[in-house]
Amino acid sequence: MNCLEARPLLDALVDGELPTEQAQLVQTHLVHCPACEQHAALLHTLLARLADDSLYQHAPVSLPGRVEAALDAPPPPSFLYYDLSPRMVCIICSVLVLLSAGVWWAMQPDDNPRHKLSLAQQSLHAHQQAFQANRTTDFESSNAQAIHQWIKQKTSYVVSVKDLADKGYHLRGVRLEKTSKNTVPVVVYALDGQNIELYLWPIQCSSSLDSCHSPAYGVQLAGWADGEGFTRWAVSTLPQQRIDDFAQNAAKK
Amino acid sequence: MHADERRRFGEAMMLHLDAAYNLARWLTRNDHAAEDVVQDAYCRALKYFRGFRGGESRPWLLRIVRRAAYDWLAKAKFTAKTTQFQDERHGWSVAGNPEEQLLRQSDAQAIRAAINQLPEAFREVTVLRDLEGLSYQQIAEVIDAPIGTVMSRLHRARSQLQQKLLTMAHRED
């Protein structure tokens, strides 16, 4: 063992923390190396000085009582526990107020007819795109319960799907349309070989039954709010009267 | 918390109040802060006491005190003095008898000043070993580092202490 190996181990040797074999090697080195021996002596002197009791910081007499009192005190409210600055408290309160207002606003029924018509326009637009892409359903089924489950699985919406086969409207399936703001299930019925697409917008509008038509696209629409938090728009190339009949049957409780 | 658990905590931990204060005081270098840190650490320790599976209570408590002290330092923005670890080997200065003599004459005030000048990482191992008398294994548990790190930090801390004390002694001469 040479000096470079021995010096870093002197502290552990003096502290009695070296394994026996290693301690013997260092001690053997010290016998033959006056420089390291002097280093060890210097270390002993330093440790003797550090053993001076006045260096030890004893707890003030009042501290045990203070600690005991803190331990027995009821836990502080978690809000204060984080020692927030008044400014931070103001920011958090403002954010909470804004969020609450946003949630409240979002839950209000939207009675503005223009909003309802905007959903009609969006339904029309989606219908046109699906038509051009030759896309009718993502999931084919004539079972209302199966379609209900599929929608729930894909969107987490719980929305009723009516079986109107006894009225002549046969379920064909369902697809999903995605807009920038919403995911809209579209339930597809068939009447006399013609499709009726029922758009389920997760937006509450006025409950009155409205009709409109688009001469440019040759389609008719009928819309109503279902009382379940959805606004439904039926879109089809069938004559307006037949769409209105469908809407009345579908809107029945 | 159950009254029995609270009583057991008191019995196991209040014995180490001096050790907790000693470590907190050396780390924060401030009397009031040390008291705050100890109070905070005891409250944290009580919270975690259910997870304490017996064994040595002093290292367990000191680990929490250390954490609370560093949190206090961070809050007080004292961390700008972050320790720069230098891995280069320190030069070996051969100390003759006169240096040993000077070191022997260093008074407690000089030693206190020299310890306070050590970087936090070196100061804590010095306090834990030389003032608290913890084993290397216990120090490793407190600072959450391997024993090799404890050895190397202690060695560097003591080398720096010697240098500082000798410099102070020479200055006085």
Image (tube, rainbow, N blue to C red):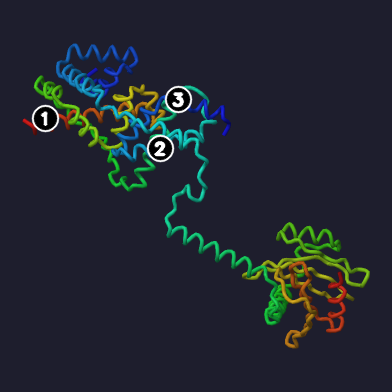
| Mark with earlier residue (3, 2) | 3
For the N terminus of chain A, which image quadrant? top left
Residue shown at the point (29%, 20%) measured from the top left: A12
Q: Residue furthest right?
A: A166
Residue shown at the point (25%, 15%) measured from the top left: A26
Q: Position of residue B169 (x, y in %)?
A: 11, 30
Q: Secondary structure at mark 2?
A: helix
- Residue ID for mark 3: B57
- Residue ID for mark 2: B67
**In the image, is residue B75 above or below residue A250?**
above
Judge left or right: residue A102 versus residue A246.
Answer: left
The picture quadrant where one finds residue A4 is: top left
Instruction: Using the image, tell me which numbered label, if any, was put on residue A243.
Output: none
Residue shown at the point (6%, 30%) measured from the top left: B173
Say which of A32 and B140 sits in front. B140
Judge left or right: residue B40 versus residue B154.
Answer: right
**In the image, is residue B121 above or below residue A111?**
above
* Measured Cα–Cα span from mark 3 to mark 2: 16 Å
- Residue ID for mark 1: B169
Q: Please give the count of numbered marks on the rendered protein.
A: 3
Say which of B102 and A65 sits in front. A65
Please give the chain letter of the residue carrying mark 3: B
| Mark with earlier residue (2, 1) | 2
